[in-house]
Image: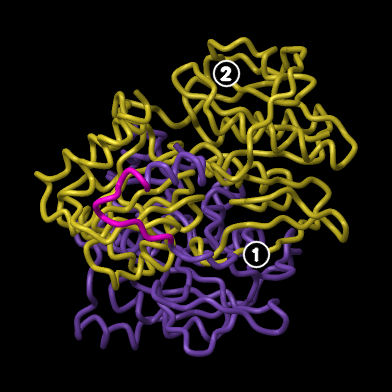
Amino acid sequence: MVLIFVDHSDSEIKKSSYEVLSYGAALAEKLGTSAEALLLGAVKDDLATLGNYGVSKVHQVSNDALNNLDAQVYARAVADAVTSLNADVIVFSHNQTGKAVAPRVAARLKAGLVAGAVALPDTSNGFVVKKNVFSGKAFANVNITSAIKIISLNPNSFQVKQTGGTASVEQLNITVSEPKVKVTSVNKVKGEVPLTEAEIVVSGGRGLKGPENWKMVEDLAHELHAATACSRPVADAGWRPHHEHVGQTGIQIAPNLYIAIGISGAIQHLAGVNRSKTIVVINKDPEAPFFKAADYGIVGDAFEVVPKLTDEIKKLKG
Amino acid sequence: MKILVCISKTPDTTSKISFKENNTKFEESGVQWIINPYDEWYALVRAIELKEKDASIQLHLISVGGADYDPVIRKALALGGDEAIRINATNNDSYFIAVQIAEVAKQGGYDLILTGKETIDYNSSSVGGMLAELLDVPYISLATKVEVNNSAATVNREIEGGEETDEVSLPVVISCQKGVAEQRIPNMRGIMAARTKPLKVIEPAAVEALTNVVSYELPAPKAGVKLVAADNVQELVRLLHEEAKVI
């Protein structure tokens, strides 16, 4: 059985969870087994509707100790669920929660983990999972040799598929240990689209000359319902917060559309964004290396092009 | 207090990535090796800052690798730390590496173990969590701020769309990223001192890897950029809408 870990925050199931559900369901079909979901804690959503993403059952562990993420508590609960449900493969999202919990579950169950998978396993000769390596510059095909196998899927790597099904929801009775990590405050940026979940990202570089010029980036992002990002020099100069820095040593993203404005495209920046499905580069320097990695480009002054682009998108949407 | 910092060796961020032997091995020729930036800039420098405030702290570095690791370990020692331990084994499996470090950490009685949030070559973000599980201690991942007193740590960590502040008793394993500390350049005194700092080499524990790399591949090259004139932004929007179908 393929067991899919369903992640949530603020009582809502995360978008990345639908991706892992669809991935896990496709994997179960490939292996000729069933796909079931595991949810720790409580959400507002009706769990039966997860059947729409291909799972037959949803196992829920309701316990107040699970309201905050303590990786130790979560890992123990997941491992106990795996053992009691007899799961062979566990699927996580390679998001913040998956990075905290999946390695612990792997060590606890002595199960091989491929972290950052980008495709379904090839089972023709072993259990070989393709994953992102060298920060987006290459892929490795990794064989898992243990009996229990764990995959964490890179966000935005798998198409969500709705099947129209309904799942049965069952309470799973397992002992939940006392958390040792106490969360004292949570500081979320309200109203913005989280960068790692965004389908469209608008990003600015040094070519924008100063933080006062970011309004046009934000206007464009707003029209596209996109997240904003920036290059490393921009974050280092303090023009934008560090959590917006995308690149090899920042956040690595794979949106459907990445619009780079005034970014030259250093190899370290490309490593963080080159899994984007479509890349648009706007730069006044026709020699900017980013054009080589782009799908569409405009050689021109960002201060003229970007407001026009925002207007044209308004027209399209209106 | 005893602090252990896990150090990996990775290709320099500007390295061209290619493979050899029918795409089964990483082509190392011409590659400059560095300390994994997350291990160096954040985990190691933060540990050094803590030691600067409290000289009684013992700071140890640990790596799992062959003799080719030694120059990188000396570079780390030039930044700071009292001694280093290298477990003499070459393996890419996170579980294998975590077990090796856990064996040493169990003997060492460390209060704080710091890792980078991931290595920039395998990007698995896994060793820290596995290590914490093997030691049965809490794990805080993706930290952006680490404060420590004698018995507890206060840590900010990245969550989706923001940060949270956690409090946890020691011992704990923490994976570090931007915000935890600032990059430092080693000075001549540090480089000289590093030459005589102890670098213990120990043999690995017997453990089977749970994964192995079968082959590598490079991403398919882009078809080439379609340029649109700067006075024809409308055309770009049409292409994104009708051809790429992304808006």
Q: Is residue A96 left or right of residue A141?
A: left
The three-letter code of the residue at mark 1 reads Ala
Give x and y (percent) for residue A18.
61, 29
Residue B13 to residue B195: above or below: above
Residue A165 to residue A224: above or below: above
Chain appearing in purple on the rendered image: B
Q: Is residue B124 left or right of residue A20?
A: left
User: Seen from this angle, which residue lies furthest right?
Assistant: A32
The answer for which chain carries disc 1 is A
Residue at mark 1 to residue at mark 2: CA–CA distance: 34 Å
Chain A visual colour: yellow
Marked residue nearer the N-terminal end (1 or 2): 2
Q: Nearer the viewer, mark 1 or mark 2?
A: 1
Front-most of residues B144 and A215: A215
Question: Looking at the picture, do discs 1 and 2 lie on one chain?
Answer: yes
Query: Quadrant of the image for the C terminus of chain B?
Result: top left
Q: Residue at x 70, y 38 (%)?
A: A23
Mark 1 falls on what kind of element?
Answer: strand
Mark 2 falls on what kind of element?
Answer: loop
Give x and y (percent) for residue B238.
42, 42
Q: Which residues are magenta?
A: B226-235
Give x and y (percent) for residue B209.
73, 63
Question: Residue A128 occupies which quadrant of the picture?
Answer: bottom right
Q: Residue at x 23, y 45 (%)?
A: A306
Give x and y (percent) for residue B72.
42, 80
Q: Is residue A1 left or right of residue B147?
A: right
Q: Residue at x 51, y 46 (%)?
A: B244
Front-most of residues B200 and A262: A262
On the question of residue B137 being in view, the answer is no
Residue underneath mark 1: A140
